[in-house]
Amino acid sequence: MLLHPTSLPGPYKNGDIGHQAYRFIEFLSSSGFKVWQMLPLGPTHDDKSPYQCMSTHAGNPQLISLDWLEDKHWLDRNKIKLAETDDNYRLVCLEQAGSYFYRLEDKLTEKNLKKFKKNHQNWLDDFSLFMALKKKYSQTPWYQWPDKIRHRDSKALETEREQLKDQINQVVFEQFVFFTQWHEVRGYAKQHNVELFGDMPIFVAKDSADVWAQRKNFLMNSDGQMEYVAGVPPDAFSATGQRWGNPLYDWQYMALTKFDWWKERFATQLELFDMIRLDHFRGLQASWHIPARDDTAINGEWVEVPGQELLTELNKTFHHLPLIAEDLGVITDEVIDLKNSFNLPGMKVLQFAFDGNNKNPHLPHCHHPDDIVYSGTHDNNTTLGWIKNKSDYDSEFFKNYLNIDDLSDEDYAWSAIRLAMASVSFMCVLPMQDLLLLDSSARMNVPGTTAGNWSWRFNWEQLNPETVKHVLRFNSLYQR
C-alpha cells in the first residue's frame, strides 16, 4: 500500500505518525498487506514537496505526534491558543514541549538524548544550526545569508552556535522525538508483519543543510551559483521536460572520498526503513545537465556518472542493501545493465501499459518476477481518474486486454487493480486512493507543477467493507 503519513486522517493540517499510523498498520495487516510504502520523510519547504527536503537525514517535525507528547506529559494543549487547523499549531506545540523537555530531570531521558546526539552527530550538528539560522534569517535560503555565514567561517559559526543555543536545542529535541516515535512505529509494524518501504530522491534541494554544510559534493561555487542544474528531458509527463533545479553532484570529488556522503545517507535510511526505492535511478548512470539560465529542461544533455563504482562501494559497506530502482522515463541499455548487474528490482506501472503496443513492457504479460508492479504512483492520476480520462490511454486496447466491455468506470478500476495483483511481479503496490476508488481530485502530485500538491488525505468512512473483502480475496487468489 502506498500512502504518505501526511495523508493519514486527523484533526491537524496533515497526518502524522501518531495513533492513526498504528490504526493504519492494523488495517494493512488485517487486509493482507505486507508492505507500507511512503514518500521521503524529510522536512519540506513551503511547497511541501517531500522530494525537495532541507535534509537527507532529518525527519519532518510536522509528522511528530502531539498525542505522544501529551502521553509523556511534555505537552499541555490547553495552553495553546491557536486553532488545531492553524499552519503553526504543531510547531507551537513542539516549542512548548521542547521547553518542558529541557527542564526535566530524568536520567533515562538524558541518557537517550545523549545517545541519539552521538549516533547522529555526522548530520545533526549542521542541520540544527542550519534550521536555527533559517529561522533567524526569516527562512531565506542559505545562499542569501551574510557572507561569513554563507561561506561557513568557523569563528562566525561558533558565535552563531552560542547565540542560537536555545533554537538549536529545540531542533535537536524535535529530531530526537521524531526518531524515537518512528522506531516505535517501525516496531509496531514488525509485530504485524508489515515492512516499511521508503523513498530516496536521487538529488537534494539546493536550500538544504547538506548543500550548505558539504558544498564540495556539489557542482557549485562557494556562493551557491551553478552552471548546470538537474532535471529530466521531455517525456510522457511534460513536453518541455522537468527542470528540477537541484544541484548536480561533483562525482569526481565523491569518488575521492569513497562516496562517504552517500554511505551516511544510506545508513540513516536503513535505520528508518526495511527497503528503499531509489527515485530516478537512471541518474546513477547519467544525469540530465540543464543550463541554469534556461527556464525549461529541453536543452540539456546526458552526462555519465560513476554509478557502478557507487553501488559497488555501497554493497561493500552494507551487508544488506534492499534497494528498488525507479527505472521509469528515458531508460537506455546502459541503465538496464547497471540495474541488472546489482540484481535490483525495477518498476512497472499499469497506467503506462495501454498505448496499443502489445510489447509495452508495462503490460502484465511482459512483467518479470523481479519487477514491482504499481497500479499508479504518487506522480500518476488515481486509477479511477485515469480510467475516466480516455485521452490518457487506448481504451479499446484496454478493454480488449481485459476481455470485458460495458462496465462502469468503477468496475474498470477494480479490474485494473486485479490485473496488477495477478501479475507475476513479486510485489504489487496500490496507492490508497485506488483502494478507495477515488477520482482525480484525490491525486497526490502533478509533475511539473507546484501548486495544490501533496495535500490529499483520506478518512476511514471512505473505506467500504466490501473493498477489504475484495482485496483479501485477491491477496489469497494471487498468492500475494
Image: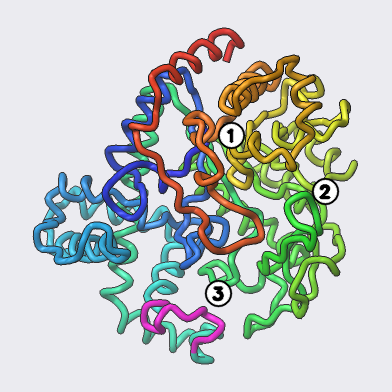
Image height of 383 relative to 289, above or below? above
Range of magenta residues: 134-145
Disc number for residue 212: 3
Q: Residues within 10 Å of mark 2 (few under 14, many from 20)?
A: few
Q: Amino acid at mark 2?
A: Val
Residue that label 2 marks: 330
Disc number for residue 384: 1
Element class at badge 3: helix
Q: Residue furthest top?
A: 477
Q: Position of residue 63 (x, y in %)?
A: 36, 51
Q: Of label 1 and label 2, which has the lower sequence position? A: 2
Q: Amino acid at mark 1?
A: Leu
Disc number for residue 146: none
Q: Residue furthest front?
A: 406
Would residue 39 appear left or right of 337 to someone viewing this image?
Answer: left
Q: Would residue 141 be counted in the magenta stretch?
A: yes
Would residue 9 appear left or right of 200 to someone viewing this image?
Answer: left
Image height of 156 relative to 327, above or below? below
Q: Are marks 3 and 1 in contact (CB under 8 Å)?
A: no
Q: Of label 3 and label 2, which has the lower sequence position? A: 3
- Which residue is drawn at the image coordinates 30% and 73% (left, top)? 167
Image height of 246 relative to 287, above or below? below
- Which residue is drawn at the image coordinates 65% and 55% (left, top)? 447
Q: Would residue 364 be counted in the magenta stretch?
A: no
